[in-house]
Amino acid sequence: MQGNSNSELEFVVVYNNNKYDIGNYLDKHPGGKAILERYENKDITEKFNQIGHSNVAKNILETHFVQSDNSNNISLTTTSEKIDKELIYKKLFTKEDEYFIHKFLGILALLSFIYRYSLLITYGSFGFDNPSITILSLALHTLLSSSSFIFHVLERRIVSNPLLIYKEYRLHAILFTLRSVGISIIGLCNVKDKYTTVIFMLMIHILVDITTLLYGTKGVTSVRAFDKSNLTNRMFQLSFSFYQFVAIGCQLTNRSSIQDGFNTLIAIQSSAFLMTLRRKNLIKDWLYVFWYGVALILSMYAFMLTHSSILFAVIGILFYFRVRFNVNKYVIWTIFTILYHNVIKL
């Protein structure tokens, strides 16, 4: 491969008379890098179609689009240098969402988050005073998550590129959305039994584990699959995983169920949205980390308004045992639930 600067193409292939720069995808290819290296500056159309790649593979290829190969006189520019309006439109508006259902729901969900967190920052509450409006808000976010079935996604996680949406992740996102919505409804119905939320969350997490068993990558989870080679990445991963622990702990308290349920939706749905933008090469990895971090900070702020600092300290200790000693999560949360509801109020 020729030496490149940031302004040069890295590794060009031709597919259906279109040129694609797949330089930053070589190491991420599920079939390995070697199988692609022989096709530099060559037409891959016949071989690509012969193998029978899925629509997901074609979508991944489209994210590396450079230009139509109709003229040898047009200088090439990479998507990292310039993404014109036509290309952005092509990436954002796909045939899979022909009637813009997912996008319309996404816009409404974004406006919902802006409105609710504006109220939170201003008044210290999400403003769920009207049950009918609350139910509509929860229904909106549920429909948004469920509408992701419109799209084709990868069958399995690509460990080297975790910001691509895959089947396990999508199902987890839907299940965690149902967990959040269900907890909010439990609060909205003013259910007094302290273990209703616990049983409901247990059922959801069992379904999550079944999903991982069927579609997951063995040994790779959000808590244990840390990048030990890079301290910065490890700190970010630990922070994101700790947030997940905080969310579960706060929801298990059954103290402010409507708010605690809704509050986790911003983490779930912003992650899916940002991963979609990243898959389409419309944002960089650091932008994903930045905006997802903003979402988590807002969510943590909401938790801190209704829960004590001692609770967070206890959750921190439990998180340490989970990461350091790989203590079973069901054991951890069983102990937490018994202590919280029967021994001490944190």
Image: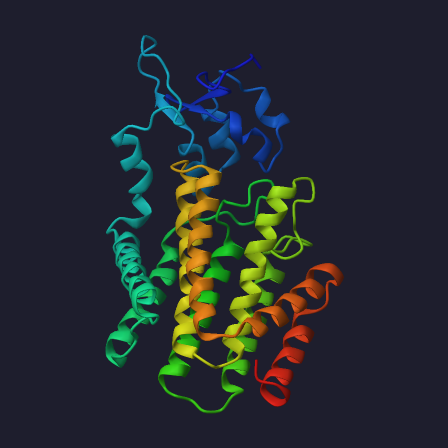
Residue appearing at x 65%, y 45% in the figure: 227
Q: Is residue 74 left or right of residue 10?
A: left
Residue extending furthest toward the right? 325
Is residue 150 rendered to the left or right of residue 25? left
* Number of marks present in the image shown: 0
Query: Looking at the image, is 247 positioned above or below residue 105?
Result: below
Percent across and percent down for residue 321 are 71, 65
The percent coordinates of residue 171 (x first, y second) are 49, 61
**Side of 124 relative to 52 (left or right):** left
Residue 308 position, x and y percent, is 52, 74
Q: For the point 50% across and 50% down, which residue is it?
A: 166
Residue visible at 40% across and 60% down in the picture: 266
For the C terminus, give its image quadrant: bottom right
Q: Confirm whether residue 159 shows in the render.
A: no
User: Between residues 127 and 153, which one lies in front from this camera angle?
Assistant: 127
Residue that extends furthest to the top in the rendered view of this protein: 73
Name above or below for residue 65 compared with residue 57.
Answer: above
- Residue 31 visible somewhere in the drawing: yes
Image quadrant where one finds the N terminus: top right
Report the front residue among 117 and 176: 117
Colouring used for the render: rainbow
Answer above or below: position of 338 versus 308. below
Depth check, front residue: 26 or 186: 186
Spot the residue most to the bottom.
Answer: 192
Q: Quadrant of residue 337?
A: bottom right
Which residue occupies 46% across, 69% down?
Answer: 303
Picture quadrant where residue 213 is located: bottom right
Above or below — where is 59 with respect to 336? Answer: above
Q: Is residue 280 left or right of residue 52?
A: left
- The image shows residue 209 at horizontal and vertical percentages of 60, 66
